[in-house]
Image (cartoon, rainbow, N blue to C red):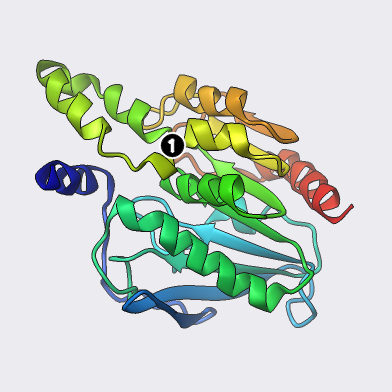
Amino acid sequence: MRFLSWLTDRLILQSSRHDIQVPERSPARFIHGDGELEVWVHRVGQDTQGTPDLYLLEFPGTASRAEHKTDFIEDCWSLRCVEIWAVNPPGYGNSSGTASLQKLPAMAECALQEVRQVAGETPVIVAGGSLGSVSALYLAAHHPVDGLLVQNPPALREVILSLSGWWHFKWLTRMIAKQIPRELDSLANAQRVTAPAVFVTAQQDKVVLPHIQNQIIKAFNGPLKIFSMPEAEHDTPLTESDFEQLRPLASWLFDTVTH
């Protein structure tokens, strides 16, 4: 079972520790278990020197890092000031430990606790693309958050079982799918969420198949807006035309969490 858990982590997580220079951002480190959790903080908006209107806690995708720019999260706001806290999970960047799905819930809780202490009464939205949405949905289901912003959300068990290239080894695929931590069941978590959310979904996604994304959307129990991209694949960048359609949804999300 330990081998299967290790194999599952290796198949899903693509961690890295190489140095990434980001002059416009600043890293912070917080105590997490026996080590540290690295969080990169920066602001976007019209007046980044002012008091934030919103705090946004972001979790990166499987091969991404907190240092990377995430367009659908950063460029969708018309607010004066949004402070973004992007987290490197264990095994990524300078966060301690090894990359493991089992560690994601505690990591997410630690990051939320830290940002809440700074945000005070200011709303906190959790966000993430692809694998990052798994941590965001976990927090929204189990802890008080004000809103949710996710892109191409996977249900990890269903994604693994959909791997058609493994059809000769269905027994192994099923065993690996069973290693996904119960806390990271995005379908079950979606049913528990009552906070408002915006989902961005690529309808030509070959990594997280659209029908899997739609299962999460149908299960979601809170107020919801969907930005569907009919021709987009998993990593298709958003165009300015896409942002013109997404920004009103982000404004709706902010108005909903503040009123």
Q: Is residue 18 left or right of residue 233?
A: left
Report helix, strand or loop for mark 1: loop
Q: Amino acid at mark 1?
A: Asp
User: Which residue appears farthest toward the right when viewing the image?
Assistant: 259
Query: Could you say which quadrant of the image residue 170 lies in?
Result: top left
Name the spot of residue 179 as percent of width and height, x first: 25, 38
Q: Quadrant of the N terminus?
A: top left
Query: Could you say which quadrant of the image residue 239 lies in?
Result: top right
Q: Is residue 59 left or right of residue 160?
A: right
Number of numbered discs? 1
Q: Is residue 6 left or right of residue 48?
A: left
Where does label 1 land, which residue?
185
**Neighbour class for label 1 at 10 Å: few (<14), some, many (≥20)?**
some
**Residue 138 is at least partly visible in this image:** yes
Name the spot of residue 198 as percent of width and height, x first: 67, 40
Residue 215 vs residue 32, the one in the foreground: 32
Residue name at image x 28 percent, y 50 percent: 13
Q: Is residue 181 left or right of residue 215?
A: left
Residue 143 vs residue 253, the one in the foreground: 143
